[in-house]
Amino acid sequence: MGLKEDNFKVRQRRNYNAVLHVATPKQTGGWRLWVLLIVFVLILGGSVYMLFFSDYFRLREVQIDGGSEEMKSSIHEMLNWETDYMVLFDSKAFASSLENKWDELAQVNVNKVWPNKIEIVLVPEVAKIVWHSGEKLFLVNSAGIILGRIEEDERLSKYVDLPVVDDLSGLFFEDGDRVVGRDFVLFLETVKFDIETSIKKEVEAFEVVETTFELHVKMKDGFSVYFDALRDPQTQVEKLSIFLKNDIFVNDYIDLRVPGKVYYK
């Protein structure tokens, strides 16, 4: 049976291009970022205000322990030139400025006690030697600064253990003057300690004749020892110890100032 061509229709497949359509979600969270930013700025601004502008962290109390009334008054004046706010106050720099201003202070501690207090502790230098110049006796600290004048009876009652330096130069001194440098005081202390502990000899007194470049040590054995104050004290004491072991009779002096040599009389 034949089919009519007119009744026979061939259905052809249509070709489609495969295109993926992705729907972008709507932007709905941008306002949250702005809120967080505003909150951050408010917190930062509030912190800056509290630290630098509010009275809560403004310096209100200063406690000073130690030192004279004149020294305390001067410190308050110095603080007026620093800052009113704790966060800007540099405690280490201020302590250093106090140490540089007063040589009679052995140590200065400056602490910030939040929110608005500063504690300052002044540790004074103690006397290390007694300086005898003319008819006067002075207490001298480790920096070579005169702390004050004393009388002989006071020296014998309170400072009998301190070494006495007889200054034969005839210079005039008063309270607060620097009579020697810190190195000289340390040199003298080292010489005294090493002679008494290593050589087992007793020192009667010390003398400065014309300059602090030299130190004369008067021994209780009746002779003096001349030291070069610019050279190592321990090396010179060792040289003195070796010399004394030879049992050489000395009735005037032993001179250690020339390196590698010992002169005596």
Image (cartoon, rainbow, N blue to C red):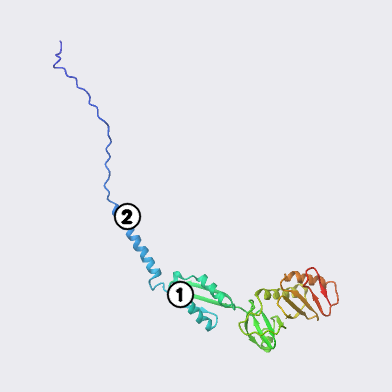
Q: Is residue 129 left or right of residue 114?
A: right
What x and y, as percent, mark residue 259? Answer: 78, 69
Q: Quadrant of the C terminus?
A: bottom right
Which residue is tagged 2? 33
Quarter of the view holding residue 9: top left
Near mark 1 (Cα within 10 A), the count class, few <14, some 14-19 or many ≥20, is some
Count of numbered circles on the image = 2
Quarter of the view holding residue 245: bottom right
Which residue is tagged 1? 117
Q: Quadrant of the N terminus?
A: top left
Q: Amino acid at mark 1?
A: Lys
Q: Is residue 252 left or right of residue 211?
A: right
| Relative vertical location of residue 21 with respect to residue 249 in this rendering, above or below | above
Q: Amino acid at mark 2?
A: Leu
Give the residue displayed 53% in from the left and 81% down from the top.
71
Q: How far apart are labels 1 and 2 at the CA level?
A: 40 Å
Give the residue displayed 28% in from the left and 54% down from the top.
31
Q: Is residue 46 left or right of residue 265?
A: left
